[in-house]
Image (tube, helix red, strand yellow):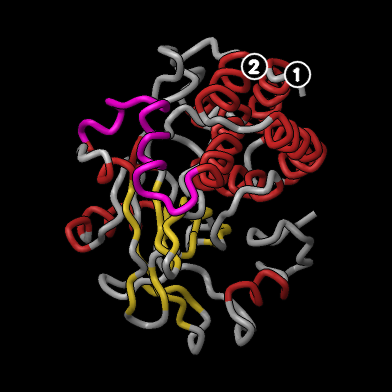
Amino acid sequence: MKRCPITYDPCGKSLYCNKGLKLLSQNLENLELLSYTAEEQRAEAIARATKISIQGVQPKLSAVLNIKESRFDLADTGGKYILKPQHHIYPQLPENEDVTMRMAKVAGINVPLHGLIWSKDKSLTYFIKRFDREGHKDKVPVEDFAQLARLTRDTKYNYTMEKMLLLLDEYCTFPLIEKAKLFRLVLFNFLVGNEDMHLKNYSVIRDGDKIELSPAYDLLNSTIVLKGGAEEIALSLDGKKRKLTRKVLVDYFGKERCGLTDKVVESTLLALSQAKETWFELLSICFLSNEFKEKYIVLLENRLKILGL
């Protein structure tokens, strides 16, 4: 069955379903192939690297949605979307990130509009709408936790989850609410094998007079990409980066360090448990290869057992 890469709904003979197009814009009737191959996108990302504020291991491009021409256009300035093509070393990162972000949304985690689009070589490119842009020119104040901690891209792993909580206390308007959000996100990342949530993958955003955690981004199963990484978490927790247990994640981090009540902790665990069925459904129909689907499912099942879910 042919599925829309934006919604995973059946799309017949079309590249996208109408619902997927309308998520991008109510005025969009069609979407042309991205006019670059994956290799050409990577080359463009290198050439434009000094002109885009979003960096990282994955090649990234800034883009705008050209509704009149029914296509995404690359843009050095004013981009409203980030595009991530296929990586030349790590396979299926766009498909991996897209399904993981969908799973996060099911778990009650705030994520931006995102999806997959077809490129001219029929490879899939991941897109995500920027949450640090508003209107045509306005930038929304956003700072990642490396900036808050006064660390750099080179030292983004030199921190602990315990210290992150102190940053929430210092910068967020309602720290306890943000700690509950962070607790859910940390449990989710453990469950899906995201071992690369360093300081630059967490941010705070200003919404009027309120400063809070930004929508989640850069969520993917890095464990299956790295073929079984040695670590389970990027920033140490209780002095550990591997062999994490329910006691460490729930009792120590959630209750002791975050200071969450039993009611909040249990409601978080319940939400994750209730998301399981949909997670497995998403993995079964997503655009990952069968090999990667199987690896993802096996890891998820093992991690659910560790948390007793």
* Residue ID for mark 2: 246
Residue type, label 1:
Gly
Q: Are marks 1 and 2 in contact (CB under 8 Å)?
A: yes
> Please, what is the three-letter code of the amino acid marked with disc 2?
Arg
Q: Is residue 9 or residue 113 the one in the foreground?
A: 113
Q: Is residue 193 left or right of residue 275?
A: left
Residue 161 is a magenta residue: yes
Residue 100: image location, x then y, percent: 60, 42
Q: Nearer the viewer, residue 81 or 110?
A: 110
Q: Which mark is residue 289?
A: none
The percent coordinates of residue 43 (x first, y second) are 27, 54
The residue that appears at 37% across and 35% down in the rendered structure is 166
* Residue on which the image places disc 1: 308
Q: x and y percent of residue 257 in the render?
A: 50, 25
Quarter assignment of residue 18: bottom right
- Please identify the quadrant where the N terminus is shown: bottom right
Residue 303 can be seen, yes or no: yes
Residue 300's image quarter? top right
Q: Which residues are magenta?
A: 154-175
Q: Where does residue 20 sit, x and y in percent of width and height?
A: 67, 69
From the viewer's perspective, tell me whether residue 161 is left or right of residue 124.
left
Residue at the spot 63% in from the left edge and 45% down from the top edge: 104
Q: Secondary structure at mark 2?
A: helix
Q: Quadrant of the C terminus?
A: top right
